[in-house]
Amino acid sequence: MTLQTALENEDTTAPLISIEGLTKRFAGRGGRTVHAVEDVSFAIRRGTTVGLVGESGSGKTTAGRAILRLIEPTAGKAVFDGIDLFTLPERQMRAYRQRLQIIFQDPFSSLNPRMRIDAIVGEALDARGFPRGEKRRARVAELLTLVGLSPDHARRYPHEFSGGQRQRIGIARALAVEPDFIVADEPVSALDVSVQAQVLNLLSDLQQRLGLTMLFISHDLSVVEYLCDEVVVMYLGRVMERGPARQVYADPRHPYTRALLATAPVPDPTAKRVHVPLAGDIPSPLDPPSGCVFRTRCPHAIEACAKAVPPTETVGDNHAVACIRHRELAAA
Amino acid sequence: MAGAVSVAGQEPNLLMRLMSRPTALAGLVVLVVVTLAALLAPWLSTHAPGQLSIVNRLTPPGSAYLMGTDDLGRDIFSRVLHSGRTSLMVGFLVVGVASVIGIFLGLIAGFFRKADAPVSRLIDAMMAFPDILLAIALVAALGASATNVILALGIVYAPRLARVVRASTLVIRELPYVEAARALGVPTPVILVRHVLRNVTSPLLVQATFIFAQAILAEAGLSFLGVGISPDIPTWGTMISTGRQFMSTAGWMMLFPGLAIVVTVLALQLLGDGLRDLLDPRLAKDI
């Protein structure tokens, strides 16, 4: 470890991981290209949680997978602890994998149905060379307790658990390797609302207790507001707006963010709501609109929007927006 | 559901759990009996399997000859017992050879995108040949011997298993638990065995029982065509082929070796069915 990275580790404001220009394109049918993620950049400070929001098809899950190299990114950088993960050969990447973990959306297919819970969590312990025997049993019990399960659940199979319990097992597996960074890919969207709160509380509690750094992918804005320090809003593979959660929620600058926030339910039936019409579906990433990708659904789109991809402009402390009209819209 | 499984240290073992499934248990018992009968053939048989008795040729089943005699006056009962040794061995070994090749090819084709096209085309090419024809060609190339017949049939049936394994692997490859293992840095061969193969066992077992049955019959076909195991070693298949000529006059010549195959295959399928359920923790309802 160089002196510089050692110093950075001391500094809690330094980013643990910074993503620069992340791009992922897939080969589509007939030689066409699917632009899943285009030029996404953001940084996550140590011990904080960044929410990645956007509707279905916005590329948020692909971005999360690409950062961990579960799918190979097409271009970009992911600087983690001073090292660009994307340039590491697969063998060296393996050593890093334990420091980077993922929690999946679907608690049913994320656990091997033929393995008992202790084997599932134990596989993670294996990965970091944890000794077998009594010590391991104790560690598995400890991890299960940490996520709110009972140690005697260890000898059961996944199908004996409810969705929420399974999600806890998935969290225990991710935590078993004591990671520095966790990608939580919509960890509660497959759960009942009543169980969502429990799992969210668990994540928030673990985040504080273990000082986890997290990328929280979700389409649910209220969940992100509750859990995240910062938000990154994605649409059709690109970042529309990013900034501190409080600021983005209080003062959204991008028309897309405004539309998203306007559609989010507010627990107050008398609250007045300004409806920003957001017609139609997200366009196909096979053929994204020219210029600003949001212009086809944007109520404020003008001709200039089609000309060039809007540059990301800083509008406040750490708050940035990619819209050429954000100033006049804010004034209006 | 949670019942017996959850009591730590008191999980019923596979055999005990098998007891709760009468059909699977019956399959196991029959299979054990058939195997024992074949193994103990020299002690159980009433005559030497090759002993000719022209005066007693084509005798119907009776007290002297339990299952009658064939066209050369040989005791069918003794021959069925002795044939069982070869037939069962051929069946098991062919399934073994086919499994090793088929599982390997299937996993490779299903898991590695780049290997899929070449391996799948190879599988398709092999399946384009009629089974027997391909087996004959292979035996002709390798030379006729028991080992080569088993090897040839193993190669012939391997593509079927490979297809089943590939199809399931394609699905499992994309499941989050495989991704989770990759995220943990679990080496690919371990992922293939622990996460993929383990979840392919159900269709694999079903297919393997079919192949077992077909291998016994195919071996008969090869013997009939003269490229099988040498004719002086009796098998159920060869007995059926010779019996065919006397079907209308001495039906017992075909009936008993045929019954032996039916009983064995049926038992195997019942057992395979039960095992499939028992090996799947989701279906295993315990006592």
Image (tube, rainbow, N blue to C red):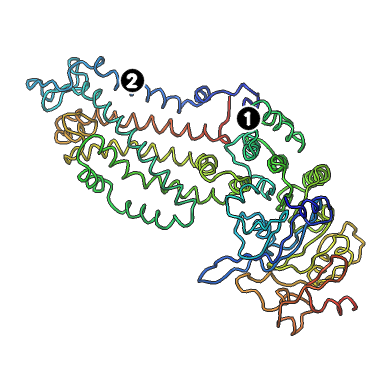
Q: Residue at x 48, y 32 (%)?
A: B275
Q: Which residue is mark 2?
A: B36
Residue found farthest to the bottom = A303
Q: Nearer the viewer, mark 1 or mark 2?
A: 1
Report the front residue among A303 and B242: A303
Residue type for callout 2: Leu
Label of residue A132 in the image: 1
Contact between marks 1 and 2 (CB within 8 A): the answer is no
Disc 1 residue type? Arg
How many residues crowd mark 1 within 10 Å: few (<14), some (14–19), many (20+)?
Answer: few
Pointer 2 local density, CA inside 10 Å: few below 14, some 14–19, many at least 20 = some
Which residue is pictured at 44% across the width and 37% down the height? Answer: B205
In this rendered view, identify the residue nearer to me: A288 or A37: A37
In the image shown, does A93 or A183 lie closer to the viewer?
A93
Are the residues flagged by discs 1 and 2 from a single subunit?
A: no
Residue drawn 37% across and 39% down? B210
**Residue B34 place in picture, x, y as percent:** 33, 23
Quarter of the N terminus of chain B within the rendering:
top right
- Give percent across and percent down for residue B54: 7, 22
Q: Chain of mark 1?
A: A
Disc 2 element = helix
Which image quadrant is residue A115 in? top right
Foreground pick, B211 / A185: A185
